[in-house]
Image (cartoon, helix red, strand yellow):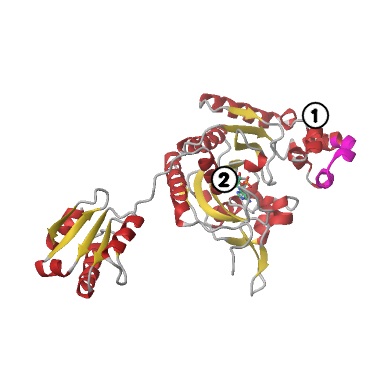
């Protein structure tokens, strides 16, 4: 028997109410903050991701689904959503529109990870990007939107973590200080961190191993190394966030796992969970568009994992509305009635009334049981007698009351 590949899952009908609930909140929040939808392809040139996410990141080093197609092109299933949006921004000349351009997406994301609860090889993200402005008020708005999104989902007990990791000017000085500090602790570091120290020292700060976390406790903090511009930006962002009454906490260890970030980085986490439970994260990436061949264009964005959102909705017992069940079930007794049922079902559907028609030659009792299981509001019953008299029996499935009604009044009654 075939099974879904490891780390992937089927979203069965019983799960769909959660997905539709989240999707509807996504559409609402994007409309409130003026974001338009964009859908990019599921795969891109591999170079787009190595270039933007960074050669030295876990995503690029270990997690990409890369393949060569029949024409020899190197392609990668998208391991994140920001780079494709930036590629589209450049490819379609969106810099000619009023800035910032605000785009959102809901898309499947592919990362070859070790699967566990809340961590999959294919997951879905809701993400949004505001491209073309460096005003700290925009950072605050992007963070506010993420926070209000979770509020609108009725998810509570979340924490908002914030940091600034500086820019091209000030980051090198900070990285030098970090390397200098860690040089005294090489023996205490895990093997991954020994490599990070050489290749990607920022990532030393968010290693999950307790021995490495202990070393990180007294490591230099990025905010102490910000250049005057980055410092002003970070101060202004914080005062905007206070204005919006957002309960942020500064987390000096927050560095994010993708290399394109500059200045603002932030994450939203359940209060009771570790880093693996992060619901969403984002930040500024002021150099990325230029890196991909455009003019210098500041930008900021955020993305959240939908499976993790749903796990938390369930954990917190948040009720989600059921999906509409079929309006009408049509049951019949006898072959002649079956033909009438088929004609009636077809006619009602053309009028926009949802119908499920019985199949086969089950007893009426069995057909009613099926209608009940399907959650139909009404069942229409047709037998020989009804055909002769031009009527049908209309049964209210909640009260079990039924009455004979003229066929030509049925549509109106159902409405
Ligand atoms: P990210 O933090 O890598 O950011 O992913 C965003 C969110 O996707 C995570 O917080 C998490 O909820 C979810 N997620 C990530 N990996 C998995 C996985 N393997 N299984 C389930 N859920 C997962 C980005 O991808 C950036 N592009 C976000 C961004 C947008 N930054 C700026 N704009």
Which x, y percent locates residue 10?
53, 59
Residue at which label 2 appears: 308
Q: Quadrant of residue 413?
A: bottom left
Residue 130: in sight, yes or no?
Answer: no
The quadrant in which the N terminus is found is bottom right
Q: Residues within 10 Å of mark 1 (few under 14, many from 20)?
A: few
Which x, y percent locates residue 162?
63, 32
Which x, y percent locates residue 408?
12, 62
Question: Which one is in front, 85 or 367?
Answer: 367
State left or right for residue 286 relative to residue 138.
right
The residue positioned 13% from the left and 68% from the top of the image is 385
Residue 336 badge = none
Q: Quadrant of residue 66?
A: bottom right
Query: Circle 1 sits in a helix, a strand or a loop, which is it?
Result: loop
Question: Which one is in front, 173 or 154?
Answer: 154
Q: CA distance from mark 1 to mark 2?
A: 32 Å
Residue at which label 1 appears: 218
Span highlighted in magenta in the image: 182-198
Which x, y percent locates residue 109?
59, 55
226 vs 60: above or below: above
Question: Which one is in front, 114 or 178?
Answer: 114
Q: Is mark 2 within 8 Å of ligand 1?
A: yes
The residue positioned 64% from the left and 28% from the top of the image is 232
Residue 21: in sight, yes or no?
Answer: yes
The residue positioned 50% from the left and 36% from the top of the image is 155
Q: Quadrant of residue 412?
A: bottom left
């Amino acid at each position: 028997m075939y099974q879904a590949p490891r780390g992937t899952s089927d979203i069965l009908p019983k799960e769909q109410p959660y997905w539709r609930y989240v999707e509807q909140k996504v559409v609402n929040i994007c409309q409130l903050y003026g974001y338009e939808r964009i859908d990019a392809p599921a795969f891109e040139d591999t170079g787009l991701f190595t270039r933007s996410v960074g050669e030295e990141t876990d995503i690029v080093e270990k997690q990409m689904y890369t393949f060569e197609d029949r024409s020899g092109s190197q392609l990668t299933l998208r391991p994140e959503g920001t780079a494709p949006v930036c590629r589209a921004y450049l490819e379609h000349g969106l810099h000619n529109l009023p800035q910032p351009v605000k785009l959102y997406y809901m898309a499947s994301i592919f990362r070859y990870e070790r699967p566990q609860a809340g961590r999959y090889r294919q997951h879905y993200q809701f993400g949004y990007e505001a491209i073309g402005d460096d005003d700290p008020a925009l950072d605050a708005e992007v963070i506010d939107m993420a926070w209000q999104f979770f509020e609108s989902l009725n998810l509570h007990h979340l924490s908002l973590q914030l940091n600034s990791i500086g820019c091209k000017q000030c980051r090198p000085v900070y990285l030098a200080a970090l390397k200098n500090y860690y040089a005294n602790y090489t023996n205490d570091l895990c093997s991954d961190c020994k490599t990070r120290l050489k290749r990607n020292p920022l990532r030393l700060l968010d290693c999950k191993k307790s021995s490495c976390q202990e070393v990180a406790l007294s490591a230099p903090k990025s905010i102490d190394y910000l250049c005057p511009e980055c410092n002003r930006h970070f101060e202004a962002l914080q005062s905007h966030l206070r204005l919006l009454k957002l309960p942020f906490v500064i987390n000096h260890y927050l560095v994010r796992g993708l290399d394109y970030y500059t200045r603002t980085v932030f994450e939203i986490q359940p209060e009771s969970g570790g880093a693996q439970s992060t619901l969403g994260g984002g930040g500024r990436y002021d150099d990325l568009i230029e890196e991909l061949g455009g003019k210098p264009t500041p930008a900021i964005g955020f993305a959240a994992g939908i499976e993790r959102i749903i796990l938390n909705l369930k954990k917190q017992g948040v009720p989600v509305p059921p999906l509409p069940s079929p309006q009408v079930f049509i049951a019949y007794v006898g072959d002649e009635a079956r033909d009438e049922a088929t004609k009636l079902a077809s006619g009602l559907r053309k009028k926009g009334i949802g119908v499920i028609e019985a199949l086969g030659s089950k007893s009426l009792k069995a057909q009613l049981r099926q209608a009940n299981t399907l959650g139909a509001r009404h069942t229409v019953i047709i037998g020989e007698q009804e055909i002769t008299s031009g009527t049908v029996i209309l049964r209210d499935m909640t009260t079990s009351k039924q009455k004979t009604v003229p066929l030509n009044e049925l549509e109106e009654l159902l409405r």
